[in-house]
Structure formats: structure tokens, C-alpha cells
Image (tube, rainbow, N blue to C red):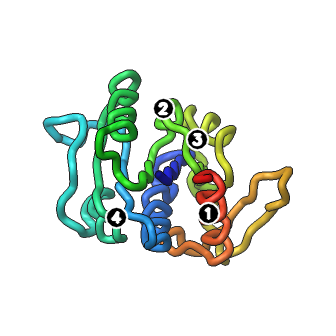
Amino acid sequence: MAVIVVGGSGRGVGKTALVCGLIAALTEFRWTAVKISTHDHGKLKPVWEETTAGTETDTARYLAAGAERALLATAEGDELGAIVRGLVNSKEPPPHLIFESNQVLNYVRPGVCLAVHGGLDKPERKPSFSFVVRNADAMVAHSDADRMLGGDPASKPIFHLATLEKISAEMLVWVRLKLIGKAR
């Protein structure tokens, strides 16, 4: 099972766009995309499944990008841990999981962890982002053009993407290699 975690420095930095870009680019995977939120979204249960693709919600965007399933989990702490363990360890686990969350790193070891930084436009920094950065395999930032900085074995690469919903060829190769390496 491939597992990707996308965390971010704050709200509106492009986490959902990056998740959608990864889903659309990694078409060989049958993704179950999970948005984890501590905010009340008006759902009756802590885990809710989106069934309609579109642009109205993050989970609808996941389906529009090509996810097989899209879930919204509104939980924290022990409840979140139980939800994540339930997904990963169920009798019929999803083929592959992609999470949009900082908190999920407390409960799952991803094959790839990406940290999205909002840059100067979004200086807000969630306290949980420091944990994401420490566990990230790479940093991602919105930029004027696609390019990669770093990338040597001693440093985390920094991917600059002109559009977070469109993964650069260089980043796509890097992500696939990381997922294949973790699957062995």
C-alpha cells in the first residue's frame, strides 16, 4: 500500500491543490484520499464519504482529480488515531492512501511526506507544521516556474511548482521512486 501525507504551514497554502495534482499525476494508483480536519463541517459522523466529483469541497476536488474514494475525517487525538488505524488495518484496506493533514503523522508512516509552505504570501504557521517539516521527505512551494532545489542525498529537495495542481516531471519521477523504494 502506497501512503502519501501532504501537510502544510497553514490554511490556503495549497495542500488540497497538491493532493489533487498527485492524484491526477499518479494514475496507476487507486487512491483513497482523506482530508483530516479539526473544524466542524456539519457532518453527523466523524468519517464522511464524498460521492460527487466537483469543485465545491476539497473531497469533491479529490474525486474530480481521479481519486477512487474521498473521505472527510473530523477528529483529533485518540479518535483520529482510531480512524487512521481503522483505514490502514481494515480487512479490506484501500489500495493506496493519500492524506491531507499535519496530525496524521502521529498515526501513520507514509512512503512520502510532503510539506507545503505558503511562502511570503501566507506567513501563518500552524504549530503542527514544525513536526511535518521534521518528518517531510521534501518541501513544496508555489513559484513562478517549476524547478527543484537540493536533491542530494544529504538534503531534502525543495520543489517549486508553478501550479500545485500540476506536478512537474522532475517531482513526479522523485515521488514514484520514493514510493517504489518504500514498497520493497
Which circle's residue, 2 or 1, is located before the other in the chain? 2
Q: Judging from the image, what secondary structure is the residue with disc 2 in?
A: loop
Residue position for label 3: 125
Residue position for label 2: 107
Front-lying residue, 8 or 177: 177
Above or below — where is 52 with respect to 7?
Answer: below
Residues under labels 3 and 2: Cα distance? 22 Å
| Residue 14 seen in render | yes
Measuring 60% from the left and 40% from the top, which residue is drawn there? 132
**Amino acid residing under circle 3:** Arg
**Amino acid residing under circle 2:** Tyr
Residue position for label 1: 175
In this rendering, the label closer to the viewer, 4 or 3:
4
Report which quarter residue 51 is drawn in.
bottom left
Above or below — where is 81 with respect to 5?
Answer: above
Above or below — where is 45 with respect to 120?
Answer: above
Residues under labels 1 and 4: Cα distance? 17 Å
Q: Are dots 1 and 4 in contact, CB under 8 Å?
A: no
Report which quarter residue 69 is drawn in.
bottom left
Residue position for label 4: 67
Q: Judging from the image, what secondary structure is the residue with disc 4 in?
A: loop
Q: Are dots 3 and 2 in contact, CB under 8 Å?
A: no
Q: Judging from the image, what secondary structure is the residue with disc 1 in?
A: helix
Query: Label 4 crowding class (10 Å Cα cut-off): few <14, some 14-19, many 20+?
Result: many
Q: Judging from the image, what secondary structure is the residue with disc 3 in?
A: loop
Q: Residue furthest top?
A: 78
| Residue 120 seen in render | no
How far across and down, in percent of the image, does residue 148 sit? 74, 68
Residues under labels 4 and 2: Cα distance? 22 Å
